Each structure stands twice: as C-alpha cells, then as structure tokens.
Amino acid sequence: MSLPSLSVSLDNPVDDSHLDSVLAKLGHTLKAEERADYLALLKAFHETISAVKDLPDYVPPTDLRRFPRENLHFPKAEENDLGAWAWKFTAKDTQPNEGILVGKTIVMKDNISVAQVHCLLGTDAVTDFIPTSDATVVTRSLMAGATIVGKAVCENFSMTGTSFSAATGPVHNPYARGYSAGGSSSGCGALVASGAVDILNRGVGGDQGGSIRLPASWCGIYGMKPTQGLVPYTGIASLESTLDHTGPMTRTALDNAILLKALAGNDNIDDRCRATPPPSQIPNYPSVLDEVKKSTKPLQGFKIGLLKEGFHDMPSGLNDPRVAMKVREAAEKFKDLGAVVEEVSVPQHSMSMPLWLCVVRMGCVPGFMGGKVGRQGFYDELLTIKMGNLHTAEGWEKTPWAAKNMIMNGVYMQSYCPELYGKATNLIRRLREQYDEALSKYDVLVMPTVPYLPTPHAPLNATVVQKIEKGLGQTANTCSFDVTGHPALTMPIGMLEAREDKNIKFPVGLQIVGKHFDESTIYKAAFAWEDRFSWKEC
C-alpha cells in the first residue's frame, strides 16, 4: 500500500526509539541493513497521519440550546438509597413538543453518552470522561418529548451480571437491600422498579449478554433486547460490536412498546442498522394492545414453544427448580388466552454460552488494548484514548476484577487458540438457523430469563472467584440471543421466596423470544398476559 510521499518535516519526532518500541510490541527484530529504510517509512507514515490528527473531529450534532442540561450534580447519599444513581440532571425540550414521550421521565444507563454529563462507566479506572455529543437514544428520547432525569449506575465496564462491581458501590435490589439487582444495567433496573422520582418508570439499558434482561428479571420489570440494529448503538460505550444492543426497561409492557417506538430506526451512523428501516417505517408497537383488548381470546391461533433446553441442564449450582416451575405455570396461562403451548427443542441452545464466551472474551480485548477497528460508526476519540491507558502498569492496577479476567481470557485465546473467535462465529450461524427453524413453527419461544433468584452481594473481602461465583450460569438463557440477534423480552410473572430468608420475596422473569424484527408479536403475547393476570399475585 503506497504512501503519498517520503518527504518529512524537520520537526518530525520519529526516531530509533519509536521503531524499537514497535518492534518490542511485535516481539520481532529487523536486519541491520533494513532499519534505515523502515525508519524512513515510519517517519513518512507519521507525516501522513499527523494531517488527520490535526483535523477537528466530526461528531453527531447536539442541540444544547433546545435541550439544555440543568441541575447537574453527583447524587448525595440521602437521595441515592439503592445506590442506583450515577449522575443526576434534567434535560428536556424547550420548544413545544407533541411527541409520544411527552410527560414521561427516563433514566439512561451510564455507558450512554449525554453531552456535558460525566460518563462514569461504573469504574474509577477511567475518569473525567465527559462526552461532547448525545447518543442517538438520548436525542430521540428528547425529540419525542421525554424528560431525562439522570444516569443510572452500570456495572464496572458493564462486565458483570450481578450488581456489586460498580466503583460507586453496590446497587441494591428494590425488594431487599443487600441482594443483587442484576447487571450490568443494574441502576436502571432498580430505579425503574422502585418508581423513583415521581414514578420514574422508564429506562434505557444496554445488553451484550443479558444486561437489560437480567436486572429487569430480578427487579420485576419489562426489559426488551431488540433485534440487533433496530435501535442504534451510536454514542454508547461498546463491549463487543457484534453483541451490542440497547433497549427499553419499563414497569409495563405498554410503556416498553412506546419507548421502543421512540428509539427504533436507522440513524445512518451505526453500521449495525443497515438492514433497519428508518424511524418513519417502524411499526406502531403500542397499537398491538388495542388488538389484544378486542377479544377474550386475544391469542387465538397463536403458537408458543416452550424451549426444552431453557428449562434443563442449567450450568450452575445456583440453579433453582422453583423458577423453572413458576415459568411453566405462567406459560400455561397463555392457553387461557387462546394460545397453543407446546415444548420445542433447539439442541444447540445448550452450547450458546460457550459460543458467546469465545466471542465476547476475544472481542473485548481491542477496546482495552488500544482501540477497535473494522466498523463504520461513531467513535469517541476521548474514550478511545482513556481506554488505551488501561494497558499501562498504572491502568492495569486500576482495572476491575471482572475486566482483568475478561482481558486475560481474551489474550489467552489470541495466543493459544486464535481461530476460535471465527469458529464460534461460524457455529453461531447454525444456532441462529435452529432458532429460526423453531420460530417457523411457533410465533414465539418461551423460557426462564434467569434460572435462579437474586443472590446476596459478595462481601467486601470476597476473593475474585467468590465474586464470580455469584453469577455462575446467570446468562445461560440470555446470551444466546445477543449472539444471534433475535429480539427477547423479559416480563415479570410471579414471586418466590428467597432461599436465604422466607420473609423476602423476589420477582421471577419469563423470557419471550421472537423472529428478527418481529417485536410486535412478542408484545402481543406480553400485552395479553399482563392484561389478564396480576403477576405479583401469581
């Protein structure tokens, strides 16, 4: 590949030390007679990229006059009982607005960029990250008339499904302090479920392995991981680009559908949205509720497949058979609504967690080791620089336990089995085909969201293994649909006593999975069940 020129300026800083540094990272050397040539080429390359470095960045525009940020502050302890607030502020439209979110309050997961507002990412390994532009989901929420009231805590770098890893402290389950609210969108789950701030009942979370659905299940709310690309991920900190999803977390199915309608549609920035229609062509998800209310048997002719592998062989000693039984009981109630409910098998489902691990572990490494490549979308250069500092000795010391484990796993794969990322990706295609085959016979698939109830937080002096044990097998039924991109909604369907304390009851989540871009059918099933049954009494 050619360079524009071999000319270099007198102040070109590249010297032998830079060449040696590059070679040291590669673990290689050069022949003595070649060093001068390669140094000259490196100097010329520096001249070319410096021209790009000196240009002003091009970022998605943010209208701060129309949507000003007011009352920005870090929450005090007395206004943060659950430990779920990361940052508080108010942002809303100053112009007349008739959008579908007028009068609605929303909280954003704290890996979502809001201009002028600190983005903590749940960590103290990266500090003073203040985005200069709004994420697409922020812009669309404001354009639809919502009032954004703050940022909700996310787990440290969004890397755990439990809720005690954030640098600001643990997020407590709204049903019992000291217990996990689920992660990594832990703050959204706790705040929405608790109805904080004038019945705050809407949040926008992120999901790469279950991080919307896990906290939604354990906090007793609705959490939708949409079809990948339905909602643009622009302006949200990525974990692994093939797994990144963002979506609504709400107290009711209707609120969930309304918020998804406001957020969905191609934004012409995120390359994962290329198959997604523009916002003007997104289905009117809330209208499904009107269809449901017209009949006493709203699911007549509807076929629901109980995923056999989703109820058995959960890879965890934490597995609670009562959860599977409760979900089966709830699924049987679909029959009262006119649906056919049958068991269906997807054999590859049991391998979905190992496949996901291969992708997420190796895929996360570039973001922690100096920046991601291979995608067309918006890159926040400030965040890239800050993340790149993590591979220094000081940065590594501050890197949290979950991130260290994930990075070491990924580097191990790069060194000893580099082919597994690609092989896992190939096998995921077969997994997707098996789900699609099942969904060709059934309208939706149903299974438990999480195979067990919320666990107590790990103690402060817990070892790394003891911390990880709190979430073993947690994503067995959720990570599958991050790798295949199918839409999946968790909804609350009942309560069970905690094993540790019979005076505590926790919600149980049922997960509904549908065809790609067929969120309407999922909402139809959820609307019908919610309209007929009171989940806290089941």
Image (cartoon, rainbow, N blue to C red):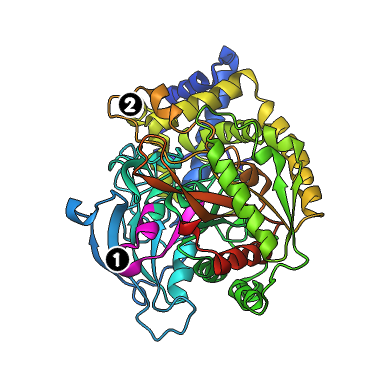
Q: Residues within 10 Å of mark 1 (few under 14, many from 20)?
A: few
Does the magenta run of residues contain 197?
yes
Residue drawn where x is 69% and y is 38% of the image: 309
Looking at the image, the residue that sits furthest to the top is 32
Q: Is residue 440 left or right of residue 261?
A: right
Does the magenta run of residues contain 228?
no
Residue 293 lies, in percent from the top left, at 62, 77
Vertical relation: 401 (above or below) 79: above
Relative depth, front residue between 519 and 396: 519
* Secondary element at image label 1: helix
Residue 270 lies, in percent from the top left, at 59, 57
Vertical relation: 97 (above or below) 272: below
Residue 132 in sight here? no
The three-letter amino acid code for the residue at tag 2 is Glu
Residue 284 lies, in percent from the top left, at 62, 75
Residue at image mark 1 = 197
Q: Is residue 398 left or right of residue 310?
A: left
Nearest-to-viewer mark from 2 and 1: 1
Which residues are the magenta region? 190-206
Residue at image mark 2 = 397
Residue drawn where x is 58% and y is 16% of the image: 30
Which quadrant of the rendered structure holds the N terminus?
A: top right
